[in-house]
Image: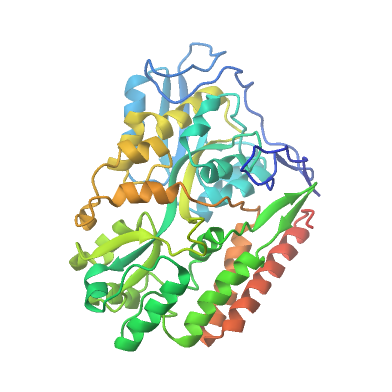
Amino acid sequence: MRLIRKPLTLAVGVPALAAVLILSACSSSSTGSAAQSSAPGAASSGASSPAAPAGGTGAKVDLNFWSWAPNVDKVVAMWNAKNPDIQVTVNKQDGGDPAVTKLLTAIKAGSGAPDLMQAEYQKIPTLVSADALTDISKNIDPALKNDFPESVWNSVTLGSQAVYAVPQDSGPMEFYYRADIFAKYGLTPPTTWDEYAAAAEKLHAADPKLYLGTFSASDAGWFTGLTQQAGASWWGIDGDSWSVAIDSAASQKVASYWGGLVAKGVIDNKPMYTPAWNAALNNGTQVGWVSAIWAPSVLVGNAASTAGKWKMAPLPQWDPAKPATGNWGGSATAVTSQSKHVAEAAKFAAWINSDPTATQALASVMGVYPASTSAQKTALTKPPAFFSNQADFYAVASKIAATAAPFTYGPNVNVAFSAYNDQFGKAAQAKSQQGFLTALTAMQAATVADMKNTGFSVK
């Protein structure tokens, strides 16, 4: 069976909902890491670094880093040039589930895992439950967490005092719209979801070919972020057990809302990232997009001819007095449990995600949106070229990112997301508002059943 140590009392403002450490009692631990240093080894490789890891032998250390991020090797080369005694080699991997599967296979085999791993936030509980990641809380500067939004830091700590990774990028959700078409039809960016529904209805009534957005039943991360904004957190810890609240009142509110829009036919119900969706972005029949900070790069590739016609605004709100957003995407740099150089690996993980030179390169060389709040303000001073008509693009984005609501993922996100694709695919095709609520209940049931079948205690 799976055992979960009782969670610690959390700081004010962080929901007490995540595990400290998840251990697999059915199998032996993977090969352990070297003893961790008690001294913090924080962000910078230069003189400004608060402290370096203690206990090193002085011998050259070679670290292996699995990552799928484009141009990450160029940023790593900057580290290697300044740190001849700690050299990092990038081993490019496929992102998402293939990378996780490969790592878990190596952990189970007891060898073959890298020192460092790029891990999506939603995959971290799965990796922790398999004892694949190392707690690096004693190897980084405790003040490091102050440079990240609380919701993002919670994603790498699971709400505990342990730290399983250092955040790299985040995906705060925003609303994108065709400013020229909005002006043509006398629309203003909706500030509430009621206003969004009214705008969608007005637009579609004026021209039945136009839609303010689409409900994509093939993008579970998108829907997850929308429920996060509404206050949902799909997994949590209840004593020594997991809790699952996919069908919470907050999630039901979101499902019912979008199900109602689809049932009325005022928004589209086709998946994103299809030839038809790309064509709609290009020809202006898809007038808005509820997306995330990385949307400009998608629009550049899929709707290049519309550059300068789009603008970005905060998501419409459920309660304007309490602005909030969700995250769609994002990843962190983790140290695996097979690393024999935890202190050195943690030092690199902190550097690449918090050192000003490194985070500038994250933005300019790798093209990611840094999770670091200071980097969001200093590394991103000009708008994306596609949004040259919106000079305050990143200033607005940084304010939005700070409002991300807390959210906890669980150990079987893949099962929940698969159930979403199946159940919401049927509901969207049927255009049934009640079907959306039924789909949510089915997601809950499938997720809980899988957790129990794989040995987790669930309340």
Q: Nearer the viewer, residue 25 or 330?
A: 330
Q: 136 above or below 388?
A: above
**Residue, x 21% and y 66% (percent of image)?**
309
Report the coloring of the rendering: rainbow
- 340 to the left or right of 241: left
Say if 443 sits above or below 355 in the image: below
For the image shown, how many numbered marks are present on the structure?
0
Where is residue 28 shown, x and y percent of the image? 75, 38
Left or right position of 278 against 27: left
Task: Return the residue nearer the eye: 80 or 203.
Answer: 203
Tell me the residue at 57%/64% (across/down). Answer: 417
Q: Is residue 172 above or below residue 157?
A: below
Give the percent coordinates (x, y) of residue 145: 52, 33
Q: Please, is residue 14 above or below residue 86 in the view?
A: below
Task: Report the residue that reaches farthest toward the top.
Answer: 58
| Image quadrant containing the C terminus | bottom right
Residue 305: % across, % down: 18, 67
Q: Residue 127 sits in which quadrant? A: top right
Res 271 seen here: no
Choose between 406 and 185: the one closer to the eye: 185
Q: Residue at x 36, y 76 (%)?
A: 212
Q: Which x, y percent locates residue 371? A: 43, 42
Relative to residue 272, is residue 302 drawn left or right? left
> Residue extending furthest front?
321
Residue at 34% over, 71% down: 288
User: Is there any visible trace of residue 328 in the rendered image?
Assistant: yes
Observer-nearest residue: 217 or 381?
A: 381
* 296 displayed left or right of 405: left
